[in-house]
Amino acid sequence: MDGKVISISGATVRVDLPDLKIGDRVFVGQDRLTGEVVRLEGETATVQVFEENRGLGIGEPVQSAHSPLTVQLGPGLLGGIFDGLQRPLRRLKEIGGDFIASGLAPSALDFEQPWIFRPSSQTGAKLLRGATLGCVREGHLEHLLPLTEEGTLATLTEGEIRLDQPIASLEEGPSVLPWHSWPVRRARPFKRKLSPETPLITGQRCLDFLFPLLKGGVAVVPGGFGTGKTVLEQTIAKFADVDVVVYVGCGERGNEMAGLLDEFAELEDPLTKRPLMERTIIVANTSNMPVAARESSIFTAVTMAEYYRDMGLDVLFLADSLSRWAEALREISAALEEMPGEDGYPTYLGSRLSGFIERAGVVETLGGAVGSLSMILAVSPPGGDFAEPVTQACLRVAGAFYMLDTRLAHRRHFPAINWKQSYSLYGGVAKDHFVGKHPHWTELQARCTDILQREDALREVAEVVGMEGLQDRDRLLMRTAEQIRLDFLCQNSFTDDAYATPDMTIVHIARLIAEHDQILSALDQGKILDELLKEIKDAAL
């Protein structure tokens, strides 16, 4: 049954179409623009259109898809670049040129590409939902193909397949395709959730040493304009020890996304020595795209991330930034004339955000494997005000807080992570892991933190009396703290120093602390600091 458009207000359209449900996907107008039902009043529905609706008129036809907004899940997603509706941008360019035209809906998967399927089950086996039928090789990993319905295997294919061909059939009747659809706003199922235990190595010394993140954990990265959120996330995406990276540019500027795509296309994965894009999925929803698609982009991306997690893989989800996602949510809420909350955001901002972040974690999958989905979420608080609603909503559910400091960024200290305000609730678990390989990890971590804290107190004194007015022990502490800040906590993302293993990190900080203790011991024996520093300088030459 077709309905019709009865009123239009921006991207919000009222339609006359019976038997709709909240969240249903509908196709609006002659161009079949994709939209989502957000309100029902009898047989009249309010639809949020995800595409540019210029030219849409009253009375144009409306059709229901009789299902919510879904994504296609199957082999071939890795290396893909999609918009917020999972439309492949490369294919959109081939069809409509450099600018995205409305009404285009190419498939996210390539149904013509052949794959070599290797079965791992046998005919006659009774399998539960989520059991693995077999695998195909996708880039650097084995892509496991799950059974989406419970049943007994009647037939099972082996060898070359295409995605539009069944790979199995069940005695109960239905055939099994190597891909399936999933609603983006519904978390994928699992057997049980587990506690995070393994550190996620980012290659950033400041994070791995002082504020570690665990696989399955959530970190929020708030920072004002120019503090390096995007560069930090992109650097972590390059070097993190995970199997798959899903990066969503939510409302980012087009030039930043273009730079990301150009850079990732040329980079080599340091772990596999293969092209970095082979393990990466990018969802690019730039600031000039419709806000409704921006709001759905993070759900599209996290659903693809959960799909690879369900294969027993470690997946890293990066969002830049949640503030622009929240702004899109605010615009949609205002168009629906809902009661605004703090700063004009809808009152359900916190619950919507919490429900999304709860999709992170370590899980035992339906197939019996263990996979993890970690999240690093950038936030762009207006004016650098961390008391604003989006930052505060993230802090309530995040396990790590990486505060980016504008003053550090102005001093060209990158990553501009404020070591006084940042924290990680995962430090205790991560410590047990690192101490097993590096017995002095906790001791050196405590010494490093102590030196940085004592430097803050001494800095105020030094500003009054000058460095010459300090005792040699205090001057030594100031010197060591400066070395830690400039030589250890700073990392240039565009040089070989961009990545440091835990082994490299512990050797680096141990050398700085050992030199400090050596000079301190000499001072206790009555030697003069300036002479000791001159000896060190001469020895280095």
Image: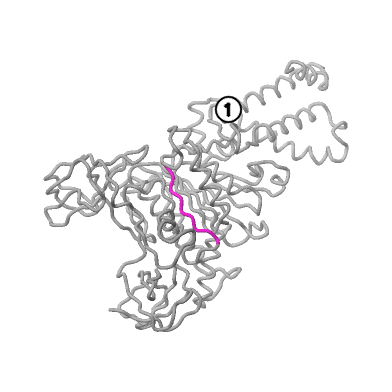
Q: Residue at x 27, y 45 (%)?
A: 114
Q: Is residue 286 magenta?
A: yes
Q: How is the image coloured?
A: one colour
Q: Is residue 267 magenta?
A: no
Residue 284 position (above or below residue 213): below
196 to the left or right of 205: left
Q: Residue at x 37, y 56 (%)?
A: 187
> In the structure shown, which secondary structural element does the residue marked by tag 1 occupy?
helix
What kind of residue is marked 1? Ile
**What residue did someone put label 1 on?**
506
The answer to which of 482 and 427 lies nearer the viewer is 482
Q: Residue at x 42, y 58 (%)?
A: 92
Counting from the top left corner in percent of width and height, residue 108 is at 36, 55
The answer to which of 457 and 73 lies nearer the viewer is 73
Residue 50 position (above or below residue 2): above
Residue 43 position (above or below residue 85): below
Q: Residue at x 44, y 72 (%)?
A: 48
Counting from the top left corner in percent of width and height, residue 452 is at 70, 36
Q: Say which quarter of the image contains residue 327.
A: bottom right
Q: How many marks?
A: 1
Q: Main secondary structure of the magenta part?
A: strand
Counting from the top left corner in percent of width and height, residue 429 is at 49, 38
Which quarter of the rendering shows the N terminus?
bottom left
Classed neighbour count for the residue bearing mark 1: other residues with Cα under 10 Å, few (<14), some (14–19), many (≥20): some
Give the residues in magenta.
279-287
Which quarter of the rendering shows the C terminus?
top right
Counting from the top left corner in percent of width and height, residue 236 is at 53, 41
